[in-house]
Every structure is written in C-alpha cells, then in structure tokens.
C-alpha cells in the first residue's frame, strides 16, 4: 500500500485552503457544543464540515460495541443521493478492505492509486485515490471517516491534517453524548425501580420524584464540573500561548494576525462555556450581599431595552414592602438577563413580558418544601412571565440540563438556563417553571433573604 509521507508545514497547503479550513473548524468548535445527538453530529460533520473543505465525497462509519464491524452512518456527495437517509447501510468487518484495515490498526492512511492496491473494494463508480482516518477516544475506536477521489494522488498531508483534526473533535463529542445517554438511561432505570415502591400514595410519589430529579441533576453536575475543570486546564494553556504569541509581535502577516484573532475569540467563547458549566455544577465563586431586588430589576429592564424589540411590552409589578435578597448581585443580574433573552426569543412576533416581585415564605407546616425545592424560611420571589410559544410538557424536566436547547445548531449553546439553575441552587434558592404551548412560560426565582429562620 502506498502511503503519502507528511511534508514540511510550509508545504501543507496554500493560504486559501488553510483560511477555509480554519474558519470551518472554528465554526465547528462553536456549533458542536449544542448538537444534541450522535445522528445530527455525524450528518453535520459530513455535510457542514468535510463538505465545506473541498472533499468530493465523505462516508462516516461507526463501530459496534464489540469493535468488530463498521456501519455506514452518514455520507456526503455522490454516495448520499437520499438526503439524510442511508438505504441499506454498508457494513464492513474490521480488517476487510482499506476502511476495515484502518479500523483494525487505528492508523490513518492515504492511498495514492487505488488501482495498485489489492485491498481496494471497487465501488459502482471506481475511485483512484482514498484517505481514511480513524475516530478514536482513549483506546477505543469510535468510527472512521473515509473519502475517495476520481483522480490519483488527490490527497496529501494537508487533507490528512485537517481530517485528523475533524475526527478528533467528532470523537470527543461522541464520547460526551454517549456518557449523557448512559446517565439518562441509568436515571430512567432508577426512576422505574423506585416507581414500583412509590405507588402506595401520591405523596410518596412526589417525594421520590424530587429525589430522582435531585440525583439526576447532581450526576450531570458532577460530570459537567469534572469536564469543565479538566478542559479549563487545557484552555488555559491554549489561551496563554496565544496571548504570548500575540505579545511577542512575531506575527506580521495580516492573514496570520486574523487567524490568531479568530483563535483568541474562540478561546474566549470556550472560557465562557467553562464558566457556565461551573455555575451549573455549583462551583462558581460567589460574593453574596444584601440588596433590593426591585432596584436590580428596574436597572436590568432599563438596560435590556437595547436588546428587546419594540413589539415586546415590558411591565414590572412590585409588592409594597420587600425583604432584602442575599445573593451575588452580579450573578442575579445575569440570571434575570438570561430569562429576559429567553422570553424575547420565545416571542419573535412580539408579546408581553411581565415581571413581578413579592415576598414568599416556605412553612413546612403549611406548604411542602418539595413543592418549591426550598428549605424552610423567607425568600424574595421574582416571577418572569412571557406570552411566547411555550415549552412542551415532556421537555420541562430537561430545560435546566447543560447543552439542552430547542434552537438549531449555531443559534444557542444551551447553557443559559443551566447557569441560572446552578447559581440559584448554590445560593440556597431555587428556580421553577410552568409553561403551556401557545400560552407562554413563567419562571419563578426564589432568592434567599439576609436572615432566614
């Protein structure tokens, strides 16, 4: 088998190709955070990543659990005539053909001339050259990305470098999606097993449901917090080196300076994601202080007029007397702003946004604390109501999960509500939601007071 050797970095590709590749990878790095499942991810990679890098075709295979067979999962180009449907997906045993051998060896390969390669399995339209890159996470093969070309010697070190990077990013996201699915499956099993024990009374069911939700969110919080901590260490090194490179002034080429700026912007967005994940996992650094929620609401609403369209009418209702809230003021302001932005997005044609502030007491003798996820004591309640599209009941329990979003890839990270949830729980408060399709949603924020009995 003829395998192309890597050329020196300056010979990898011309500036136009590298510019397209860097911008495509930058967009992928941002969008990948909000892609909700493996199927969407693989089709996105085939069509929106590899498809924009001048590859004639692309086929992505995934491996079975036993690491014995590859199955075609997504495609682009002539091998994808049915949109996002794979008719009779191709199955390739490990070790068979070029793709199967790459899966078995877990090493990328470039074949300059397929007519001279005995391992090539001829297709309906025979190709002349091929590049095949494994997707690996840890020591496990996740799948393979394969591309063929009708001309010989079509692939070189530039294509190998870019496709290897795409494979690494895709593998990492697939592993996170698998872990989330395993956690969800364990949660469902736990719910089912406990449900059998809680059918005696409706009260016991409610208590168990609260316990299950707390355990599920705690599990996701540990996963998010651990990932955020480890990734933050990596991001610190990346950002630090980018800043050092910028400070030295070693880059004088305008195009290279633009690439450096793109990389620094992407690193900054990554840092924002990390802070949001730490907030959800209740590991943020908070500085609680007593302050008037009414004053904070008024100043935030005044500022938000810059981002709200004129078709959204905003009203504020406040009780005659309010206790002082005792939380981190800046984080509380960010929480309210997140809810205002969500309300705006839920009302693209305009509507009403109503904010109401009052005092609220949780008394275990009168109100079940489980109804509000709160301890006994006094709270300042801020209610944010919109007349938007509403949230489906089956999705209500998921809206505070990190990276969950109903928006398309690239339109949202799915970290806004999870950040609010983590901040409120870490502060000793809570957030609840009620919603109805076509009517709108109401979010209640319960801020602890300076002194709770």
Image (tube, rainbow, N blue to C red):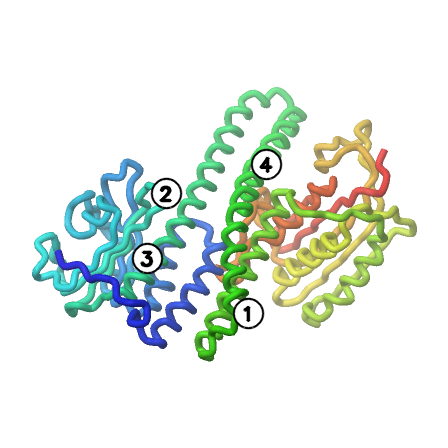
* Residue in front for this viewpoint, 292 or 29: 29
Q: How many marks?
A: 4
Circles 1 and 3: CB atoms closer than 8 Å: no
Which badge, 2 or 3, is on the more N-terminal residue?
2
Q: Secondary structure at mark 2?
A: loop
User: Which residue is identified by label 3?
Assistant: 164
Q: Secondary structure at mark 4?
A: helix
Mark nearer the viewer, 4 or 1? 1
Identified at 45% across, 56% down, the residue is 32
Which badge, 2 or 1, is on the more N-terminal residue?
2
Q: Secondary structure at mark 1?
A: helix
The residues tagged by marks 2 and 3 sit, at their Cα atoms, a distance apart of: 15 Å
Mark nearer the viewer, 1 or 3? 1
Decide if residue 168 is on the left or right side of residue 377. Answer: left
The residues tagged by marks 1 and 3 sit, at their Cα atoms, a distance apart of: 30 Å
Residue sitting at the far right: 320
Identified at 27% across, 39% down, the residue is 67
User: Which residue is identified by label 4?
Assistant: 218
Q: Residues within 10 Å of mark 4 (few under 14, many from 20)?
A: some
The residues tagged by marks 2 and 1 sit, at their Cα atoms, a distance apart of: 35 Å
User: Which residue is identified by label 2?
Assistant: 138
User: Which residue is identified by label 1?
Assistant: 247
């Amino acid at each position: 088998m003829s395998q192309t050797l890597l050329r020196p970095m300056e010979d990898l590709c011309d500036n136009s190709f590298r510019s397209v590749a860097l911008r495509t990878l930058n967009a992928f790095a941002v969008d990948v955070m909000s892609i909700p499942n493996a199927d969407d991810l693989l089709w996105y990679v085939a069509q929106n990543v590899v498809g924009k890098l001048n590859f004639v075709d692309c086929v992505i295979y995934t491996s079975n659990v036993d690491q014995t067979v590859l199955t075609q999962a997504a495609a682009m180009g002539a091998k994808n005539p049915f949109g996002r449907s794979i008719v009779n997906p191709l199955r390739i045993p490990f070790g068979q053909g070029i793709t199967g051998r790459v899966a078995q060896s877990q090493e990328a390969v470039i074949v300059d001339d397929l007519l001279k390669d005995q391992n090539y399995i001829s297709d309906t339209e025979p190709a002349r050259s091929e590049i095949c890159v494994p997707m690996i996470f840890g020591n496990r093969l996740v799948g393979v990305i394969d591309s063929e070309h009708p001309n010989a010697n079509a692939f070189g070190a530039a294509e190998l470098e870019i496709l290897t990077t795409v494979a690494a990013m895709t593998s990492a996201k697939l592993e996170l999606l698998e872990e989330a699915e395993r956690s969800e499956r364990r949660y469902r099993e736990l719910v089912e097993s406990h449900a059998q024990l809680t059918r005696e009374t409706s009260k016991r069911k409610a208590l168990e449901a609260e316990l299950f939700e707390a355990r599920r969110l705690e599990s996701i919080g540990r996963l998010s917090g651990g990932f955020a901590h480890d990734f933050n260490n990596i991001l610190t090194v990346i950002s630090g080196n980018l800043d050092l490179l910028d400070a030295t002034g070693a880059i004088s080429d305008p195009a290279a300076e633009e690439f450096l700026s793109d990389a620094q912007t992407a690193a900054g967005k990554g840092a924002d994601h990390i802070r949001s994940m730490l907030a959800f996992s209740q590991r943020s650094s908070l500085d609680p202080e007593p302050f008037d929620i009414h004053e904070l609401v008024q100043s935030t609403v005044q500022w938000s007029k810059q981002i709200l369209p004129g078709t959204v009418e905003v009203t504020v209702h406040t009780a005659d007397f309010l206790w002082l809230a005792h939380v981190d003021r800046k984080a509380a302001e960010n929480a309210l702003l997140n809810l205002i932005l969500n309300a705006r997005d839920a009302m693209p044609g305009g509507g009403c946004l109503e904010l109401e502030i009052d005092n609220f007491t949780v008394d275990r003798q009168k109100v079940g604390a489980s109804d509000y996820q709160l301890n006994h004591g006094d709270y300042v309640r801020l209610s944010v109501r919109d007349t938007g599209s509403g949230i489906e009941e089956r999705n209500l329990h998921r809206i505070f999960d990190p990276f969950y979003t109903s928006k398309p890839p690239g339109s949202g990270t799915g970290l806004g509500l999870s950040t609010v949830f983590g901040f409120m729980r870490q502060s000793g408060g809570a957030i609840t939601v009620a919603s109805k399709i076509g009517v709108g949603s109401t979010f209640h924020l319960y801020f602890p007071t300076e002194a709770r009995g």
